């Protein structure tokens, strides 16, 4: 559905028996956090597994209120009628429409988005915003949404923002623990020892849609070659899950750095990302790679400890990172 169609759909379905209309002051709130892909992006689109960790310090809060008519969005990027919102707001508009349908609310809405999660940085911003909006609508309607219902709505929004999403982001932005994902299914990962990661922003936006399309073009041009790369990425993911469970940071790091090289071979790295990975390794990281769609966005580097994370962050900023965040995954 286009932005306009989604908006039309919302404003044309105002029912007199709409619960939201009976509670005009009600506000629904919803939250979702950032994620970082540890291993397996891109290949995951073709059915191989991937590992992701939650980044709890960065997130999106959505507040939804019923409105007499139309859909109004208020965010850092845009404020106004959703029909005229830029493409980046598409996940918001799509999720809102699908969520209102799902919970049986038919009315206009006012949505406020408060986000500390940078967009187009490979951190799952479009999925997080869609999940936050969906949860806010469910909250407004006092409906309990199960994980699969939430996943379905976020996937619909993701399809509008990057075409052929694997579903990894839709699961990862609402998972409280590290996860293994494959073909829509998730399982929590075992973590043998608290593990600290530094995320560093290359400063450039990465379009997931373009990066995914680039890999598709390579697959079409050289299916056996690219399938071999996907198979090796799948092995790294499986090994990575075992190494994380053992708390073997050195071995996990080796898998991450090899994955970065394979992703670079698929054309989804760039000079800045390669420079940041090299800087992390030179500063003693056990392993580093781009994370998410690539061609911009962030790198993720393993740190030996929280103190080492500070040193890594300094080295990464010295190598040109625009900003960085540190996140620790506790043993579980
Ligand atoms: O750039 P992000 O945060 O949307 O992550 C994309 C991950 C890919 O594997 C490249 C695409 C996907 O749908 O899984």
Image (spheres, helix red, strand yellow):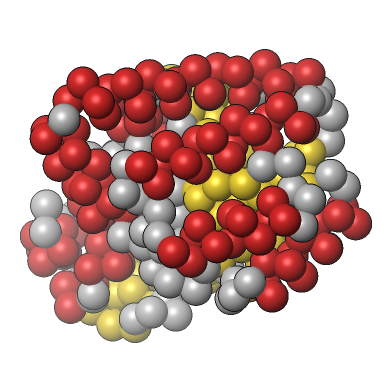
322 displayed left or right of 208: right
User: Compared with residue 259, is residue 247 higher up or lower down, i.e. above or below?
Assistant: above
Instruction: Name the side, left or right, on which 103 lies relative to 83.
Output: right
| Residue located 77% across and 32% down the image | 249
Residue 79 image point, x, y percent: 34, 83
- Residue 165 at x, y = what percent? 29, 39
Residue 57, given in percent of the width and then of the height, sits at: 69, 58
In the current view of this chain or complex, which residue is farthest to the right?
Answer: 307
At a point 11% along the width and 35% down the height, the residue shown is 221
Specify whether residue 180 is in view: yes
- Tell whether 230 sits left or right of 178: left
Residue ID at (66%, 61%): 279
Query: Which image quarter: residue 120?
Result: bottom left
Q: Quadrant of residue 90?
A: bottom left
Q: 315 left or right of 38?
A: right
Q: Is residue 14 visible?
A: no
The C terminus sits in image quarter: top right
Q: Nearer the viewer, residue 190 or 261?
A: 261
Residue 302 pos. (x, y %): 72, 45
Which is more toward the observer, 214 or 241?
214
Residue in front for this viewpoint, 198 or 151:
198
Look at the picture and state if 129 lies above or below 272.
Answer: above
Number of callouts? 0
State the residue at coordinates (42%, 76%): 75
Vertical relation: 12 (above or below) 233: below
């Amino acid at each position: 559905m286009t932005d306009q169609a989604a908006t039309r759909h919302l404003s044309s379905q105002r029912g007199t028996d709409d619960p939201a209309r009976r509670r005009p002051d009600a506000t629904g709130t919803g939250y979702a956090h950032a994620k970082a892909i540890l291993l397996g992006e891109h290949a995951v689109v073709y059915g191989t597994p991937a590992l992701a960790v939650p980044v709890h310090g960065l997130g999106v809060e959505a507040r939804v209120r019923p409105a007499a008519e139309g859909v109004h969005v208020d965010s850092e990027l845009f404020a106004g009628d959703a029909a005229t919102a830029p493409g980046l707001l598409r996940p918001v508009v799509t999720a809102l429409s699908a969520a209102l349908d799902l919970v049986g609310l038919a009315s206009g809405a006012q949505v406020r988005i408060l986000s500390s999660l940078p967009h187009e940085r490979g951190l799952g911003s479009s999925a997080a915003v869609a999940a936050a909006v969906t949860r806010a609508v469910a909250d407004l309607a006092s409906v309990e949404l199960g994980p699969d219902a939430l996943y379905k709505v976020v996937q619909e929004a993701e399809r509008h923002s990057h075409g052929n999403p694997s579903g990894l982001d839709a699961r990862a932005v609402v998972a409280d623990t590290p996860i293994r994902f494959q073909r829509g299914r998730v399982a929590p990962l075992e973590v043998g020892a608290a593990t600290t990661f530094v995320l560093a922003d290359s400063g450039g936006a990465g379009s997931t849609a373009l990066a995914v399309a680039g890999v598709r073009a390579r697959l079409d041009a050289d299916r056996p070659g690219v399938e071999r790369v996907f198979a090796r990425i799948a092995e790294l993911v499986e090994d990575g899950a075992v190494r994380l469970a053992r708390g073997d940071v050195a071995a996990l790091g080796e898998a991450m750095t090899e994955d970065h090289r394979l992703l670079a071979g698929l054309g989804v790295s760039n000079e800045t990302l390669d420079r940041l990975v090299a800087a992390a390794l030179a500063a003693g990281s056990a392993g580093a790679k781009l994370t998410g769609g690539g061609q911009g966005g962030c790198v993720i580097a393993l740190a030996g400890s929280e103190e080492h994370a500070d040193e890594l962050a300094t080295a990464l900023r010295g190598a040109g990172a625009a900003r960085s965040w540190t996140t620790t995954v506790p043993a579980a």
